[in-house]
Amino acid sequence: MAPILVMGLGNVILRDEGLGVRALQRLMERYALPHNVEAIDAGALGLSLLAFLDGVEDVLIIDAVHSGGRSGTLVRLEGEEIARAEALHLLPQDVRLHELIALHGKGGSSPQRIVLWGMAPETSEPGLELTPACEARLDALVDAIVQELRSWGVDVRPLQECQTG
């Protein structure tokens, strides 16, 4: 199976802008991922993310998506949809993901599959907690991420199952 990278993006001191990192943390608290899946808290690393793309064939990104929908609304984007969302400034990152991946591709191979799962944020005001609307939907986002990984053939198991058996 090809190497897979799961990245949680965002700034955890700006409330809902940190939901990508918070969702990744919740995923890691509840599920065991196989050795061919690397999960990283990418925060707001910018160009430093290039190093994590080496040898990766599939990327699952978790981030806030300013979709115009009600806060807490789940959003799934794939491939060129991510570039279009960035062009419309729906994603909060300073460094555009599609540009970063294209830049990486000039020096090596680009990932074959890129999927972004996110949620519409309510606010990016300073604070460490997610808003109630986003916190209430965080488990649904994690469930969607688990289902996506399973659809890729990844054996994602609840930690309880791994600890007892």
Image (cartoon, rainbow, N blue to C red):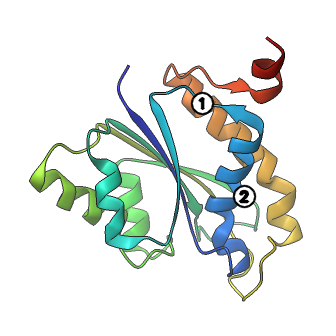
- Give left or right: position of 30 versus 136: left
- Name the residue: 76% across, 43% down: 29
Circle number at residue 134: none
Front residue of 87 and 91: 91
- Neighbours of disc 1 within 10 Å: few (<14), some (14-19), many (20+): some
Neighbour tally class for label 2: few under 14, some 14-19, many 20 plus, Cα within 10 Å:
some
Query: In the image, is residue 75 above or below residue 31?
Result: below
Q: Is residue 57 left or right of residue 62?
A: left
As drawn, the residue found furthest toward the top would be 165
**Residue under circle 2?**
73
Can you tell which quarter of the image residue 41 is in?
Answer: bottom right
The residue wearing badge 1 is: 33
Question: In the image, is residue 6 above or below residue 125?
Answer: above
Q: Between residues 106 and 140, which one lies in front from this camera angle?
A: 106
Which residue is outermost to the left? 106
Q: Is residue 24 above or below residue 16?
A: above
Res 130 → quadrant? bottom right
Q: Secondary structure at mark 2?
A: loop
Residue 83: image location, x then y, percent: 35, 61
Q: Is residue 66 left or right of residue 115?
A: right
Residue at the spot x=71%, y=72% of the render? 16
Q: Position of residue 115 (x, y in %)?
A: 46, 45
